[in-house]
Image (cartoon, rainbow, N blue to C red):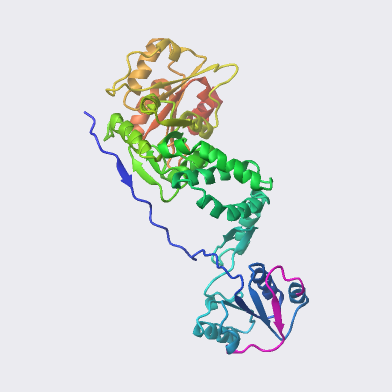
Amino acid sequence: MTDTRKPAETRPARMDALARLPVFYALAGKRALVVGGRGPAAWKVELLSATGAAVDVIAHNISDEMRDVIAGAPNGPVTLHERAWRAEDISGAAIAIGDFPDEEEAAKFAAAARAAGVPVNVIDKPKFCDFAFGAIVNRSPLVIGISTDGAAPVFGQAIRAKLEAILPQGFALWAAAARRWRDHVKSSGLSFEARRRFWHLFTARAIREPNHAPADADFDTLLTETRNQAQAAEAGSVTLVGAGPGDPELLTLKAVRALQSADVILYDDLVAREVLDFARREARKMLVGKTGYGPSCKQEEINALMVQLAKAGRRVVRLKGGDPLIFGRATEEIDACRNAGIALEIVPGITSAQGAAARLGVSLTERATARRVQYITGHDRKGALPDDIDWQSIADPSTTTVVYMPKKTLGELAARAIAQGLDPATPAVAIAGATRANEVVIAAPISQLAEKIAQTRLEGPALVLIGKAMAGAMVKSDPQAETQQASA
């Protein structure tokens, strides 16, 4: 008899060690000090002015680059003092930056700044720095900072270039609109849940039309749409989401948006923990998993919890490995939501079979040899081989058969299929942990696969793919088979 377990809340993972604390410092209207007149200092002056800081530059030798920056200060004023710096210059500054080729002078400047309680950065001298500058992607007020803690500046710049290419320039307009509209949304009379819904609609619109310049009419449209959906937002909802076979990069964009908007996530054992990293940190994450022949939450309890949370006004994501509509007991959960009058949405995922085939480098169908694909389960409610399998369909040589949860019954399944006409030499592949780092592949003719699995002691949930389309995967994963094929 299968052990039962209760739904259990998963505590958020503790933050991993940080080389630097990423902060965004408001400098508008504050005094910033830069000592040095060379090119590296000029770039820091430009950054500080861009924030709206009033920048004092102190230096004897002023480069042409520095003079150009001072003449064309982008935002805050820049004042040049052509003299040596003094300790009293630091007093009252919000931030102090120095450019000193000489180590002794750098140490003196850093000590003076720290004595005055002013955060200090000495360019290209990390031991004298309280903070560091990173690479910047500027869609202000949307700003992204990238730091490698000085380990690989070129790598940081490469990441910045990637993000520059991905993020539309128009996001700056949408971020500015968000700043203009935030107080209006707060005073609109919308509930907390409805306000969240407004910002989800806002975000979806910004991503869909990034280069549209949002105007007051757009605010009115979003507000009206939010009010029209307010009742549903208050009532809560359930979204069945496919997490894919394991690799978090195989999540769909819609799945990511659902995770980021969820209040509660009910997830299965088969869901890779990295997938949960896409969720809001504040979301409750509850394990309600089932394990083959192991402790499992009762389906009735999962249904009841899902409905209870939604009725309390929560946005619930029911997260399942692979696709929720394939051997995911989706029908029972869909019926539970419909019977309770809960708003329901389904976000399909990449199936485990698709993920496995992609990793194996094979197609599930081929025009000449595999014209049909079928999915079957390897066990029934009691863990035995189902007695209603269509054996003729498995024996059909033009079919690719994907068997879910087959490890305990594969030997019996293969024997019965062969007795019904399946060629014993039909290529077959078992794959556990498909698309994950611990993925294991075993290939053999179907008549030998169960024995080979037993010898390997395959761990974790597995799929078995049977059919001529698997011949390529069999050769790639079994060098001996490749040699035999070459000598045939």
* Residue in the image at 66% along x and 52% along y: 173
58, 412: nearer the viewer: 58
Residue 341 image offset from top left, x and y in percent:
39, 28
Residue 431 image offset from top left, x and y in percent:
43, 32
- Looking at the rendered image, the quarter that the N terminus falls into is top left
Does 83 lie within the magenta span? yes
Quadrant of the rendered structure where residue 103 is?
A: bottom right
Does 295 lie within the magenta span? no
**Is 115 left, or right, of 163 in this rendering?**
left
449, 353: nearer the viewer: 353
* Residue in the image at 60% along x and 18% along y: 367
Q: Indicate whether 278 appears above or below 355.
A: below
* Residue in the image at 30% along x and 30% along y: 299
In magenta, the rendered stretch is: 71-87
**Is 8 left, or right, of 78 in this rendering?**
left
Residue 415 image offset from top left, x and y in percent:
35, 16
* Residue in the image at 37% along x and 26% along y: 329
Residue 156 image offset from top left, x and y in percent:
60, 60
Query: What secondary structure do most residues of the magenta stretch adopt?
Result: loop
Quadrant of the rendered structure where residue 377 is?
A: top left
63, 458: nearer the viewer: 63
Q: How many marks?
A: 0
- Looking at the rendered image, the quarter that the C terminus falls into is top right
The answer to whether residue 345 of the structure is visible from this angle is yes
Q: Indicate whether 123 appears above or below 339.
A: below
The outermost residue toward the left is: 1
Q: Indicate whether 264 appears above or below 369.
A: below
